[in-house]
Amino acid sequence: MTTPTTHHTAWAAVADWLRHQGTTTVYGLPGDDMDLLGALEDTPVRMVLCRDQRNAVHMATGHALASGRLAVCTVGKGPAVTNTLTGLLEASSSAAPVLLVAGGTGLDRVGTGAFQELDQLAAVRPFTKHAERVDRPERLPAALEKAALTAVNGTPGPVYLEIPDHIAQLPVTVAAPWRTAAPHRLAPDPDALEQSARLIAAARRPLLLVGGGARHRNHDRSVERLAGLLGAALFTTASGRGTLDEDHPLHCGVSGLYTVEPAARLWEETDLVIALGSRLEETATFGWPDRAGLPVVQVVAAEDSVVTGTPGMHVLGDVARTVDAWTGLLDGHRPDEKWAERIRDVRRLLAERAARRAADAEAAVPGGGPTVAQVLTALDRAVPADRVLVQENGLQDMWSYYYPHWSCGTAGGSVVPSEQTPLGFGAAAAVGVKLASGDRPVAAVCGDGAFHLFRAELPTVADAGAAVLYTVLDNGGYGWLQTNLDRVSGPGSRFAFTADRPTGNAALARAHGLGHWSVTTPDALEPALREAWECCARGTSAVVEVRVALADQPPGMAGAAGDFPVREDQ
């Protein structure tokens, strides 16, 4: 029989659970109660002490997306919890398995106007898969295991556990060994597999769309093999990048908002979209032809991600298992060679268009300053090919979403914000991505507005030893908002979102022992990025600020128009 284990406090039980889960890193900003830190003192678990609770959840989200495993964040109570809500919203939209553990007002003081008292469950429930307050110490072991199991299974997402003051110092007995929170990769229904395979076999011009739900489910390149079997064009959503080999001869870029001609023409010509692990969000489907007439076979892990209202069907189950099953069922399928040749031709034309577009950008930038296309080319040359690029979603860092201006190649990875795109997510998430990725290089591209929201964490970056190469595109502030304002008010508005002024980042970075370079000319780009990468390779983060012009707009855009741009090809 198993001998029960008694821990002297609730937080000591949490620390022991973390150790048994194999948790390497916890992110957060604890409240006044330091018992968790005390309990972690003699464990191998790293605690990244953040300056802002929102950034802590962003870091944990980056860690979860990069590792494919549960990531953990801890904060205090009251405003500490409300500060995490943006992070929880992003983790939910990104389908990132994150456990947020918070303190809470003791049961004996609820309703008395206690210090930092808040109905925290009501605050977090809209943003989480599961939220629970543990009011009895004997409930803590089961609550931990339930939260973790919920986070990593079905459609992954954030969960919340509250440990109120009145149980924090009480002993907790664990009756049985801790169970590991592992995802269960469910096989799809055989009838659904056979029916969907018949739809796929009947298609002559298929497209394969790979979303974030396929992340970590294509280690053996089974998706590329299926594409070859079908002769299907390969696209990803923004969150699905890094899943595919982007050097594959059938790969044509990122779907929806980030698709340009001639790849956009394939969406007009296709007779079936096979969506693997995508919830078909607005940015992923922006610019698609008539949705009512385009059949889609959608593969997702759980019913909450199914999109209805279009022809086709859905398959519930693990992406890898579904792809493997289809490959077997479709063995001997003969693809339409004309369609495969059309795709290869589009890929060639995309490369030619990108070269012309980069040259046009150079001509449009006043004073011969650096263009974002030049930044991406220099970054590609400076950082090893197996790097993970972490992005924001501002006006000019969006250049990196447009293939082939940036390519993940065969070995590269990618982490991007979800449909929510909270400003500063990428800059913070890059810390978690790096700590989850070991020796793998991590680079972040962000605008100066996003970096300003994050830069209070530069001491955290230094303390954590997370060697990230930050490339900051400085257009003087919030470029997307400025271009929208210019559209409405013209250049003479008394309001402004950008200004030509120093960022102040150089002194701040150097004060914390980080490398810093400023670039204002194209010929200085590659030397600066190479030196910055050498700094990162030695274990120290580096910041490269590049002055860019507002006129240097991404290749898919003819101008801003509210949430979405006017398409360049319209």
Image: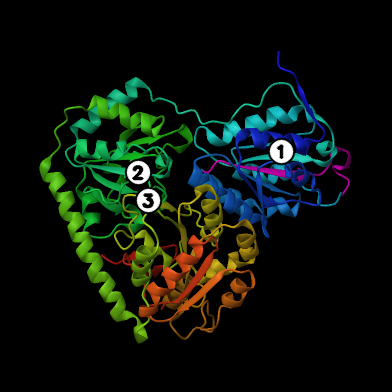
Q: Which mark is residue 284?
A: 3
Closer to us: mark 2 or mark 1? 1
Mark 3 in CB contact with mark 1 (< 8 angstroms): no
Q: Secondary structure at mark 3?
A: helix
User: Mark 1, residues whose alpha carbon is within 10 Å: few (<14), some, or many (≥20)?
Assistant: many
Question: Badge 3, how many Cα within 10 Å: few under 14, some, many 20+?
Answer: many
3D distance between C-alphas at marks 3 and 2:
10 Å
Asked if residue 133 can be seen in this view, the reply is no
Count of numbered circles in the view: 3
Q: Nearer the viewer, mark 3 or mark 2?
A: 2
Residue 320 visible in this rendered orientation of the protein: yes
x, y (%) of residue 539?
54, 60
Q: Helix, strand, or loop for circle 2?
A: strand
N-terminal of the pair, mark 2 or mark 1, is 1
Say whether residue 79 is left or right of residue 482: right
Helix, strand or loop status at disc 1 = helix
Q: Quadrant of residue 369?
A: bottom left
Q: Nearer the viewer, residue 484 or 32?
A: 32
Which amino acid, by three-letter code, is at mark 3? Ala
426 left or right of 278 in image: right
Q: Residues within 10 Å of mark 2 (few under 14, many from 20)?
A: many
Q: Position of residue 475 (x, y in %)?
A: 46, 76
Q: Amino acid at mark 2?
A: Val
Residue under pointer 1: 15
Q: Which mark sits nearer the N-terminus, 3 or 2? A: 2
Above or below, comparing residue 150 to residue 255 in the picture: above
Tag of residue 210? 2
